[in-house]
Image: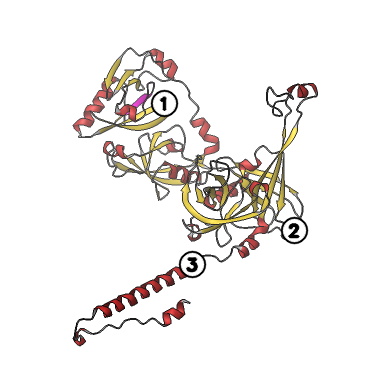
Amino acid sequence: MITHVRSHVRTPSVTPPHAIAAAPTKAARQTWIAALMVGLALSLVTVVGADAQDRPASFADLAEAISPAVVNITTSTMIAGRTGPQGIVPDGSPFEDFFDEFGQDGPRRSSALGSGFVISADGYIVTNNHVIEGADEIEIEFFPGADQPAKLLPAVLVGTDPNTDIALLKVEYDTPLSFVSFGDSNGPGARVGDWVMAMGNPLGQGFSVSAGIISARNRSLQGTYDDYIQTDAAINRGNSGGPLFNMNGDVIGVNTAILSPNGGSIGIGFAMSSDVVSNVIDQLEEFGETRRGWLGVRIQDVTVDMIDAIDGLQDARGAMVTDVPAGPAEDAGMESGDIILLFDGIAIEDTRELVQIVGNSPVGKEVPVEILRNGDMVDLTVVLGRRETAETEAFPEDGDTPDEDTPITSNMLGMTLSEITPEMEESLGVEAASGLVIVEVEADSEAETKGLLAGDLITEAGQQKIASIADFEARVEEAQEAGRKSLLLLVRRDGAPRFVAIALE
């Protein structure tokens, strides 16, 4: 035992300098060094032993306490009938004639399995949208042996949010149900390296528990509002919609996706964070739908190569406004080219952060916004609209592309530019003086590197509107005289704007 060994180790005494009569012998030095090494090793063992004690000896008590609130979800969907052998036998099979002769593949039911968890005594249940999407029937099965219903219960769909892949269900039962609560996914128990436990119905095998740690935070997959916790706790098909618990038994994530080359767990699973889910669930429970705040702008990230081209910009942070249609931002006086640095008192690092903050803000809220405009800081107040009803009206789909027949051209900054001809006016749906059309992009030029294409429309240069080749040349000259190394262009493609910084030659 460590204590027994340590009890026989003596720390070498330190002799005062004035008592030294002679240099220590070689044997004495070796004895002193050996004792010191043993002491250091024992100290390391003590530290490692203390860390090991922090690890849970077992997850059994935690699993037993929270398992009654975890459920299996079974869905069924009626699939329309198909004529002939499609889906039954492959084309060219010797059985193809048999199925042609003896009937059709009629309507049939398809079943799917997933997981979920109860969040209230009156029967509200959280799962993934993709678990119940398109289902005709939804049934809930509770943990076997738990003090919960022993039979399958039908569930009704309260609401869904495809943007975060979250759905809210409701079951009716004559006694209160066991439930779990959401925890803080940004709190002390949700740090990278903290223990977590996943529960659910993997691969239809029934209730199962797995444990691991939080591997990473703030992961984004494909969604606008993504804020995933990455974990190495085993998550497989069928775990979708199940809870990810911290060691206090609070839900800090909803297991949603895995990264896998073979469809099975390889230790890279993703759970949507509870901070996102809880806000969505509150809205689904109250309204049956989401009602997200809407600022009413198109934005893009500020890149390092833009710093030199923008007055007053010190760092590549914030969200640059590329378009301001009719809506809350326009009403507040926001303009294209503004850089949003502060929103509702929160410093904005990039567009993803701004989108999430705006989306989590209530509709109708008055929000202070601080922007950088032409080198000066400007304070605005925006009354947020509702994204679900306003976005499609403000940003309609526009697939028109410009006519490439552009006889009046000029070559600048690796691009052949043209003023808008009457033919282009009709195809673009714009006025002749609304900008310049890129006719050609030189190979290996910076314009090509930045992704500019023939057909793109340049509407601003140096954060000023341009209507002619002369305007563009003037902006280039002004930037060069000011000692700038690049020129900021506002480029539109299929109606969608973005800023691009092009080096001045």
In the image, 449 versus 3, the foreground residue is: 3
> Residue at coordinates 67% horizontally, 53% vertically from top-left?
207
Q: Is residue 52 above or below residue 143?
A: below
| Residue pictured at 38% horizontal, 81% vertical | 9
Q: Quadrant of residue 19?
A: bottom left
Type of amino acid under label 3: Ala
Does residue 492 show up magenta in the picture?
Answer: no
Residue occupied by mark 1: 493
Question: Mark 2 or mark 3, which is nearer to you?
Answer: 3
The CA span between labels 3 and 1 is: 57 Å
Amino acid on which disc 1 is placed: Arg
What stretch of residues is rendered in magenta? Answer: 452-460
**Residue shown at 31% from the left, 25% from the top:** 466
Q: Name, please, the residue furthest toward the right.
A: 102
Report the Cα–Cα distance between label 2 and label 3: 42 Å
Residue 270: x, y in percent? 53, 48
Q: Earlier in the sequence, mark 2 or mark 3?
A: 3
Q: Left or right: where does residue 342 sit relative to residue 198?
A: left
Q: Nearer the viewer, mark 3 or mark 1?
A: 3
Q: Which secondary structure, mark 3?
A: helix
CB contact under 8 Å: marks 2 and 1: no
Residue at numbered disc 3: 52
Classed neighbour count for the residue bearing mark 2: other residues with Cα under 10 Å, few (<14), some (14–19), many (≥20)? few
Q: Residues within 10 Å of mark 3 (few under 14, many from 20)?
A: few
Is residue 133 left or right of 437 when viewed as pictured? Answer: right
Q: Residue at x 77, y 52 (%)?
A: 151
Q: Which residue is mark 2?
A: 175
Residue 213 in picture, x, y percent from top left: 51, 56
**Residue in front for this viewpoint, 106 or 154:** 106
Within the image, what quadrant is residue 426 found in? top left
Mark 2 or mark 1: whose residue is earlier in sequence: 2
Please state the horizontal and vertical placement of residue 482, each as a whole percent of the image: 20, 34
